[in-house]
Amino acid sequence: MLGFASGLPNVLVNDTLAAWLSDLGFKPADIGLLALITLPYGLKLLWAPLLDRYAAPGFAWLGLRRSWIALLCTLLALGFVALAAVGPTAAGSPVLPAAIAGLVIAFLSATLDAAVDAHRTDSASGGEEGPAASAFVLGYRVAFVSIGAAILMLHGRIALLLGPEADAAAEALAWKIAVGAGGLAMLFGVGAALLAPEPPKRRPPESLSRAVVAPFRSFARALGPRLALVLFVALLFRLPDLLGNRMTMPFLRQELGFEIAEIGTIRQLLGFAMTIVGAVIGGICVKRFGLFRALVAFGVLQVASNAGYLVLIETGKSIPAFAGVVVVENLSNGLVSAAFVAYFMTLCEPRFAAAQYAILSGLMFLAGSLVGATSGYLVEQLGYQGFFLLSIAVGLPPLLALPWAMPGTRADDGPRCAGCGYALVGLSPRAACPECGRAQDPDASENRANPEP
């Protein structure tokens, strides 16, 4: 349920908005440039520490993690109603109001992602990361088909109810109605926040400055010289998928001539089913074969799956070929998503879950936003064939770096300070806590692995 709440804003502000603009006739370069509104996904590490320190105003009674989820889901529902009201009605319409609304939605959605990621990381440990990641990805993808695909499949029918066939005004109004109604499904996330259990209470960072600094210090202490490679993998590992997806809608709608309903039925509905299969299998493989083997195998599949669009360039508009590409791409996406979410979870210390997960996932989305903004320009310069070849090439360096970027013992799996709860992995049993300065007693029961501070 929380995965659904996290995935819905992402599909609406990315895939659905791109389909809306493509259908109205906006150029690929303009659609690609709109990727800049997703920059908050990459910059959320700047404000995510607040989620580790304070409960959300007005919802504090739900606890530290759930309070933010309830507040942000409510605000996002209102944000999508605003986007529907100011969205474009023709290719010549000003896009700035929609861009501003989309930017606000992306800020709220990125913060919601940090809250949901923190809740999941704080709740799952000791081998539960793989199944927890699978459940999250499954819910995330449910949002793509239940709302994302439904909008694309029903848009034409809504337009026919509003006016004659091919009436531009009716089709534009249908987009507004569909996006506004789809956005109201964010209220489902409020119900999820009410039903979800609050993770075990941990001592929050003692001050905001410590909430900002301590997550970086914890990373540096736990990862040592591997930190740079971990950040490099976080930045680029998912880039083939993020970059390729940015131009998929213009490619299918404008270059190959698929109808919006066809894209919705095949890419979203069939793709959803394969992503679910991939997410479930991915979580099982992580638990059974280990995280490293799963990441390598699924990373190779992710890179190779983008070659399917090269096949579509050769076949042209072909429903069977399109369906085959979607099956391979989304199966690979589900596999690699489950493994990569589990990878991030094993790197994070629960006490700083919001901030540390935001650092890692923020780097991933930052690369997607910045490179995605140039995607339309790249298509104009390289053509779609060159563009999809480039999306394959960018996935190779992080795969080569992966063996040296794997997590060791997670900070939460070792002893903790009896005074402030700070993880003491890698320190002498009698060393003073680097956070509060308290001398440790190696024989004290409260200082053994996994006590509640």
Image: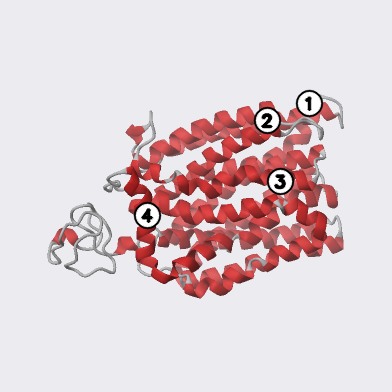
In this view, the residue in front, 432 or 354, is 432
Q: At 81% from the left edge and 47% from the top edge, which residue is drawn?
A: 253
> At label 2, which amino acid type do we have?
Pro
Residue 331, position as x, y percentages in the image: 63, 61
Rounded to the nearest angstrom, the CA distance separating label 4 from label 3 is 33 Å
Q: Residues within 10 Å of mark 2 (few under 14, many from 20)?
A: some
Q: Residues within 10 Å of mark 4 (few under 14, many from 20)?
A: many
Residue bearing the label numbered 3: 33
Say which mark, if any, is on residue 215: 4
> At label 3, which amino acid type do we have?
Leu
Of labels 4 and 2, earlier in sequence is 2
Residue bearing the label numbered 1: 161
Q: Residues within 10 Å of mark 3 (few under 14, many from 20)?
A: some
**Mark 2, secondary structure of its residue:** helix
Rounded to the nearest angstrom, the CA distance separating label 3 from label 2 is 15 Å
**Mark 1, secondary structure of its residue:** helix
Residue bearing the label numbered 2: 97
**Mark 3, secondary structure of its residue:** helix
> At label 1, which amino acid type do we have?
Leu
Looking at the image, residue 410 sits to the left or right of residue 280; the answer is left
